[in-house]
Image: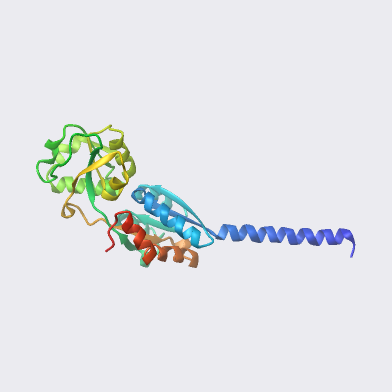
Amino acid sequence: MSRKALLYILLVFLFFGCAQKSQNKQSAELLVFSGAGLTNVVTELAEIYEAENNIDIKLNFASSGTLARQIEQGAKPSVYISANEKWVDYLIDLDLVVPESKEKVVGTSMAVIVPFDSETDTITFLDHFPEQFKGRLSIGDPKHVPAGDYAWKAIESGGYAEALTDRILPAKDVRSALMVVELGEVEMGIVYKTDALKSKKVKIVSIVPDDLHPPIGFYASILKNKNNEQTKLFYNFLTSKEAKDIWIKHGFKIE
């Protein structure tokens, strides 16, 4: 065999070998869309899963509504974790999510927070709440942020909607609502208890009674065009014993 022919054969093998490696690398990636309120815990879960499996997990955090709109417009994550049932159902109606995959993973509560150096140490949400502070109230935008929707529902149930309508500062997601309070730009905010517990710049002054808003649930689901074994393995990991310990560590409720 001539040296030229041998070189040609070697180049062919190298080409297909590189192509196979590239394909394997591509197949070992998994994109997860998750509500912003799960940033810390989902990041930790992804790191644990990556360490135990030969896979690269990409994470995208934003408000659940924003993520659902991105999926509607063509984004292709494998797993979508929403901070409420509504946005998963929205994608099911669009035939983008496997209906049977919708599962409530964890829950939490809503907390009233103030900057850590605030003189306010405790309030009673059911005792003339709007009169217990003078400034604006930061919550997620109720139109697309589940945490904001829960907060607003509680405000309405408490009979405070009229008094607080002009004092609400809506944020793009629950983490942004928390940050506004951390920076002292508002006097008070209502966010997930689990987010408040992670911040050293705010303190919880009250827990909103659970019966004032719909039950809080974070729902995992699988996208139809990514319904494969790799996706299912990570999806199942989210409710495994190992994962439940992590959820609990971060303050979430396992129901």
Residue 82 drawn at (x, y percent) = 34, 55
Give the left or right position of residue 203, taking residue 66 as reference: left
Residue 164 drawn at (x, y percent) = 17, 38
* Residue in the picture at 14% in, 45% down: 125
Q: Residue furthest right?
A: 2
Give the left or right position of residue 94, taking residue 137 as reference: right
Residue 10 drawn at (x, y percent) = 79, 60
Relative to 66, say whether 227 is above or below. Answer: below
* Quadrant in which the C terminus appears: bottom left
Say how many tags the image has.
0
Scheme by which the image is coloured: rainbow
* Quadrant in which the N terminus appears: bottom right
Give the left or right position of residue 95, taking residue 3 as reference: left
Relative to 212, say whether 177 is above or below. Answer: above
Viewer-side residue, 91 vs 168: 168
Viewer-side residue, 22 vs 249: 249
Q: Can residue 201 be seen in the rendering of this structure?
A: yes
Q: Residue furthest left?
A: 127
Residue 95 drawn at (x, y percent) = 40, 61
Give the left or right position of residue 57, taking residue 160 as reference: right
Quadrant of res 174: top left
Q: Can residue 77 be seen in the rendering of this structure?
A: no
